[in-house]
């Protein structure tokens, strides 16, 4: 157990010491997870800010309808073995409106974070990512769960 913990600490230490990745570009596209979100990324110094709006659940689900918005600040790190590949982690906040055919509707506001990997293609203006975004509601005026998470595939056009 101690060896596993030491290896984990060493890997994280090396990763945090890595230089900021070259994926710090402006990009717009979609994030496909539990619903669909329009996603915009913009540089914030050597890091990145991501704004996601959406979850168009009404197109696929007749029982639950909601719209969410979130903002995450992401620290960027290279995975030096593969050019264009990197990982990111950071805090965020969000808000949403939830409605159901069976329960009351209401507002939810909360905090969370994001962790994921992304790859920027060298020859085409495309950035793909896979991430995990946990979210905890601090204001919850609906039947919506206090804790939510989203695992998603992002596809974004780089400009």
Image: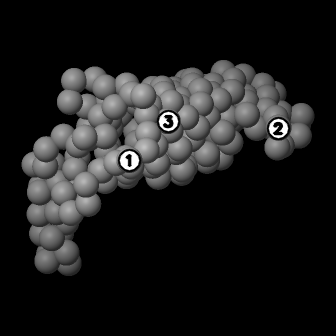
> Dot 2, how many residues are within 10 Å of its Cα: few (below 14), some (14-19), or many (20+)?
few
The reply, left or right, for residue 136 in relation to residue 90 is: right
Q: Quadrant of the C terminus?
A: top left
Q: Nearer the viewer, mark 3 or mark 1?
A: 1
Residue at x 69% of width, y 27% of height: 67
Residue under pointer 1: 123
C-alpha separation, residue under disc 2 versus residue under disc 1: 34 Å
Q: Secondary structure at mark 2?
A: helix
Question: Nearer the N terminus, badge 2 or badge 3?
Answer: 2
Residue 47 visible in image:
yes
Q: Quadrant of the N terminus?
A: bottom left
The residue shown at (78%, 25%) is 105
Residue extending farthest to the front is 123
Q: Residue at x 45, y 49 (%)?
A: 129
| Helix, strand or loop under label 3 | strand
Q: Give the answer, above or below, for where 154 lies relative to 10.
A: above
Image side of residue 75 versus residue 115, left or right:
left
Q: Position of residue 88 (x, y in %)?
A: 31, 45
Coordinates of residue 79 in the picture (x, y in percent): 23, 56
Mark in the foreground, 2 or 1: 1
- Which residue position is annotated with label 2? 59
In this rendering, the answer to whether 23 lies above or below 48 is below
N-term-proximal mark, 3 vs 1: 1
Q: Report x, y in % for residue 108.
A: 61, 25
Disc 3 target residue: 157
Q: Looking at the rendered structure, which numbered label has been put on residue 143?
A: none
């Amino acid at each position: 157990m101690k060896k596993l913990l030491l290896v984990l600490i060493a890997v994280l230490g090396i990763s945090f010491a890595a230089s900021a990745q070259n994926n710090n570009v402006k990009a717009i596209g979609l994030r496909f997870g539990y619903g669909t979100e329009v996603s915009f990324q913009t540089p914030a110094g050597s890091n990145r800010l991501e704004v996601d709006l959406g979850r168009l659940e009404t197109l696929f689900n007749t029982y639950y309808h909601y719209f969410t918005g979130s903002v995450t600040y992401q620290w960027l790190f290279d995975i030096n073995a593969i050019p264009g590949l990197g990982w990111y982690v950071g805090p965020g906040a969000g808000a949403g409106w939830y409605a159901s055919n069976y329960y009351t509707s209401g507002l939810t506001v909360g905090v969370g974070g994001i962790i994921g990997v992304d790859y920027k293609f060298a020859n085409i203006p495309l950035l793909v990512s896979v991430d995990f975004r946990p979210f905890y509601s601090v204001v919850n005026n609906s039947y919506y769960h206090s804790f939510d998470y989203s695992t998603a595939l992002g596809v974004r056009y780089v400009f």
